[in-house]
Every structure is written in C-alpha cells, then in structure tokens.
Image (cartoon, coloured by chain):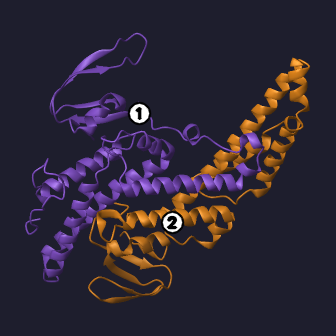
Chain colours: A purple, B orange
Amino acid sequence: MSDASDLSGGEESQEDVLTPAELITKLEEAWLNEKFSPELLENKSELVECVMEQLTHMEENLQRVRKGDVKASVHRMEIDRIRFVLSSFLRSRLQKIEKFFPHVLEKEKSRADGDPSFLSPEEFAFAKEYLANTEVYLRTVALKHMPPNLQSIDMLKAVPEPCLDSFVFLRVKERQENILVEPETDEQREYVVDLDEGSQHLMRYRIIAPLVANGAVQLI
Amino acid sequence: MFCEKSVELIRELHRMGDGQLPAFNEDSIRQVLEEMKALYEPEQNQSDVNEAKTEGKSELIPSIKFRHCCLLRNQRCISAYLYDRLLRIRALRWEYGSVLPTAIRFHMCAEEMEWFNQYKKSLATYMRSIGGEEGLDITQDMKPPKSLYIEVRCLKDHGEFEIDDGTVILLKKNSQHFLPRWKCEQLIRQGVLEHVIS
C-alpha cells in the first residue's frame, strides 16, 4: 500500500488520522470479533466507509499502473483480500440480524439516547423490513385462518435469543484484573482471574462481553 | 390423535437435509387448519366453557385445556414449518442469485415467492447503501481469494463475456478459459462455468 495516501478522518478526532495499514488492521479485528461473537456487536459504519474509500482509491491507482506489470497483480490481490474481509464482516452482521431479528430490534428500541447504536440506519431499515415481511407472510398463509385467539405470534418468544454462554477463544490486549468467573459445576465456587496482556483464554462469552466492546480483548 | 398432521409436516422438512426445499405442502396445511377449527368449535359455541363456568362443571376443564394445548401445538408446528421454509428460501438468494431456477420456483407457493421478492429488494437496498457511494455486492467474494486467475470450463453456451481490460470472451460449451477469479464467481455458482482444478 505504498502509494495510498493517508486518509483524513470523517470521524470525530478521538482517534488520530489512521494510516491505511492501521485501518485494515482495525477492519480485521472487527471482522474476527464479529465472526466469533454469538451476538451482534456495535456497528462500525465509519470503519466501513473508510475502507470503501480506501478500496476506491486503490482501484483508481490500479488503473494508472501499466498493464501487465507485476505490481498490478499484487495490488489486485490486495484489493480482493480487503474486499473479501469487508464483505465477510458485513455478511456476519447481516446473518445475525436475520437470525435474531426480533431481539435486535427490541434492543435498539430500548436503547437510551446516548448509548452507541448496534445497527447502522441501513441495517435498522433492513431489520424492520425483514420483520414486516416475515410477519405478513405468516399471517397471510396461516395465522389468519386460525381461531381468533391464536392469530398472532410473539416473535420475541418464538425466535431464539443469541446464546451468550457459548465459549469463545480470546487474546488479551489490555491487562484486566479481577474478572469474576461463574462455577461450571456444583462442586466449584466462583473465582476471579487476572487476564495478562498477550495471554489467550477459552471462556464463556457472557463474562468477557464488555471487554470485547471496549477493545480490551480480541476474539480469535 | 390430534396434531399428527402438523408433526408430519415438521418431519417432512427434517428428512430433506442440506437446505433443499420440498414442494409446498398446501394439503397438509389445510388439514391442520381444519383440525384447529374443529378443536376450537366447542370454545366458539361457548357451550363447554359456559357450562364449566356457570354450572361449575369442572370436569370439563381438562378437556378444554387439552384442546387448547393441541391448538397451541398445531400453531407452533405450522409456524415452525413455514419459518424453516423461509430460511431455506433465504439461503437460495445467497446461493443462486436473484433469479431462481424454475425447478425450485415450482416448489414455492405464491406468498413465498412474494416474501422472496421483498427480501431481494431489502437486500439490494442495503447493499447499495454500503459505504455511501455505489455500495458493495456482499453476495460476491464468498471465499477468500486464493489466486488471481483460475482455469474454468464452460458447461453451457453463455454467449459473449467481457472482462475488465475490454477483451471479449466467447463462452461456448466445453471451451476452457483462464479468467480473473472475481469475474467468474457468480457464473460458477449459477452452473455456467466450472472451476478446473488440475
């Protein structure tokens, strides 16, 4: 990426201007976290926008390179790889939105104004359309032909919730102290662990969920 | 035995693994709905319920409860059957693209087709909105890129095909070409091209 220039942030300057390499690292981290987390994570619209800009930039550079030059192939591969990671990231999110759609919408509805949004506006629109589409379908084909007291289904009860107790592998980026671990069996008691920087663990997602959100651990 | 037909619907789907979509079993669904109507009738006529309430004939209550359980089970089975079919249909969009093969379309009822069309539209709107400019087709790039160019064999006549640098390739049945991978992905999934791994 030697000929791509620095990106100016469209974001608030909590972060400094990201170099392309840092941007792609962030994308890969977000991608892995989203892939391995059982629930939908915070949305990363700015990251997506920046990566798209970067891809457009790289495509333009590619046009200027002489055809048949070896550099062109390498750049092409790079563009393909980044586009794959971005697509895979967005697909993970969409799959979770579809799988848990009533819960995702409920969470968004009950979110306080200041809290970060889990869905981008476009994802929110998609989720609402998905809910409406499915409800209309079920009603038309079956529910409206049923006895009056059975003509609706509570989607929140009917569609399973994400299993927050599933185990995930993680690597610690910032040292954490006094993480409370629930007992697995009746004989055990709850205990605390310290997570050292760089160490890797296998734990229930529920325990470390807030640490994923604030970037202290990375799911692998 | 009540609820047998609705459980049979579930079994039918369970038998077809791999996300295949069997034909829409309109007959069975109709029979289940009729069974539900028959189960509800005593409630509708209110005769049993009234008798239980006013005349204190509490021995009717177990049968009322039983019928209600059957109704709930039927509702649950039908909903599960329909919802599972929707999930399979959703997977078809990602597998085959916007246009479904005719064989599969015959297995779908009109309402399922409508759901599919709406889903396609929602997905397209979402994809167009990604990144704020032209969007990104996330139904492409399903596998990590291993190589730039791949050897493909043409399985059907597909006519002319233009690649990025302007060259036009004629895709005739059984011809083999060395093409950029990203251009071939969708054609491979649709069955027009076949990736030749030597």
Q: In x, y percent, where is residue B74?
A: 74, 41
The chain containing the residue under callout 1 comes to A
Q: Quadrant of residue B6?
A: top right
Element at label 2? helix
Residue at 21% in and 74% down: A59
Asked whether, in this view, residue B87 is left or right of residue A68, the answer is right
Q: Which residue is mark 1?
A: A164
Question: How many numbered marks does the figure carry?
Answer: 2
Mark 2 on the same chain as mark 1: no
Q: Which mark is residue B120?
A: 2
Asked whether, in this view, residue A123 is left or right of residue B11, the answer is left
Q: Quadrant of the N terminus of chain A?
A: bottom left
Element at label 1? loop
The chain containing the residue under callout 2 comes to B
Badge 1 local density, few (<14 within 10 Å), some, or many (20+)? Answer: some
| Residue type highlighted by circle 2 | Lys
Q: Nearer the viewer, residue A29 or A201?
A: A29
The correct choice, above or below, for A2 with respect to B84 in the image is below
Q: Quadrant of the C terminus of chain A?
A: top left
| Residue type highlighted by circle 1 | Leu
Q: Quadrant of residue A68?
A: bottom left
Badge 2 local density, few (<14 within 10 Å), some, or many (20+)? Answer: some
